[in-house]
């Protein structure tokens, strides 16, 4: 076999191994949380989370070069106050009946350290799509004793400006920026 054919063959094997190394991961929602916080009256912070979501990632065993696809049911918002939850679902904020799903699709994964990365993607909320950047950390990867499959713990943080998505009005009672704090346990499928 000529050197050129050997190089081509090795390149195909390497590409095949890389492609095969990618697998599908799903969020374990019992051990995951999509949380947020926003300033209220410029003196305190109100926290909440979304209880219904689906997160799928394509990644290798080390969770590098991950691609994420996220859907969140807006009506599952929970701030520990039923009146506030209902107000947030109303047309004054999320308009959950008209825009029942929020979504995020990643466009770029960049490793920034041994266990850290930057994740860029398109967030669609309230019918508006904008690019967002999240800071990520792989907390660890283990083999689950029950399933004998890999599980990964991740943390993602970032900030979005709610006004850029048309959520709520410009008011001094609420901050414009919403802090995202997402803790994920992902199970390899």
Image: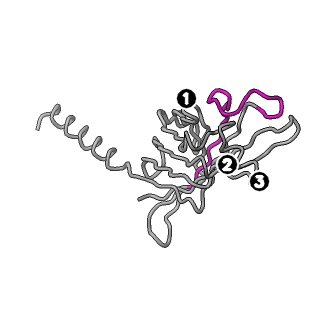
Distance CA(mark 2)–CA(mark 3): 15 Å
- Seen in the picture, residue 85 relative to 128 is either above or below; the reply is below
Write the residue at 50% across / 71% down.
145
For marks 1 and 2, the one nearer the N-term is 2
CB contact under 8 Å: marks 1 and 2: no
* Helix, strand or loop for disc 2: strand
Q: Disc 3 designates what residue?
A: 81
Whole-Å distance between the Cαs marked 1 and 3?
30 Å
The secondary structure type at the circle numbered 3 is loop
Percent coordinates x, y for residue 87 in the rendering: 72, 44
The secondary element bearing badge 1 is classed as: strand
Residue 148's disc is none
> Was residue 104 drawn as part of the magenta stretch in this picture?
no
User: In this orientation, which residue lies closer to the viewer: 101 or 68?
Assistant: 101
Asked whether 4 or 77 is in front, the reply is 77
Q: Position of residue 85 (x, y in %)?
A: 71, 49
The residue depicted at 75 percent of the width and 48 percent of the height is 84
- Of marks 1 and 3, which one's residue comes earlier in the chain? 3
- The answer to whether residue 158 is left or right of residue 65 is right
* Percent position of residue 164, x then y: 64, 26
The residue beneath circle 2 is: 35
How far apart marks 1 and 2 lie (CA) works out to 19 Å
Residue 156 found in image quarter: top right
Write the residue at 40% across / 52% down. Answer: 24
Residue at mark 1: 131
Report if the CB atoms under discs 2 and 3 are less than 8 Å apart.
no
Viewer-proximal residue, 130 or 100? 100
Q: What stretch is highlighted in magenta?
A: 153-175
Q: Please say if 121 is above or below 84.
A: above
Mark 2, residues whose alpha carbon is within 10 Å: few (<14), some, or many (≥20)? some
């Amino acid at each position: 076999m000529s050197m050129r054919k050997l190089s081509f063959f090795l390149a195909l094997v390497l590409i095949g191994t890389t492609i095969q190394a990618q697998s599908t991961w799903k969020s374990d929602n019992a051990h995951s949380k999509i949380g947020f916080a926003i300033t209220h009256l410029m003196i305190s912070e109100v926290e909440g989370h979304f209880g219904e979501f689906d997160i799928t990632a394509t990644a290798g065993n080390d969770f590098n070069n991950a691609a994420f696809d996220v859907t969140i049911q807006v009506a599952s918002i929970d701030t520990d106050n039923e009146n506030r939850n209902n107000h947030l679902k109303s047309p004054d904020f999320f308009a959950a009946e008209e825009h029942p799903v929020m979504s995020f699709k990643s466009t770029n994964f960049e490793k920034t350290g041994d266990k850290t990365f930057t994740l860029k993607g398109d967030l669609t909320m309230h019918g508006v799509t904008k690019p967002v950047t999240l800071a990520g950390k792989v907390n660890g990867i283990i083999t689950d004793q029950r399933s004998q499959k890999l599980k990964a713990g991740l943390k993602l943080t970032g900030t979005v400006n709610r006004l850029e998505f048309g959520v709520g009005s410009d008011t001094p009672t609420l901050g414009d920026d919403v802090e995202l704090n997402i803790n994920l346990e992902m199970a390899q499928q």
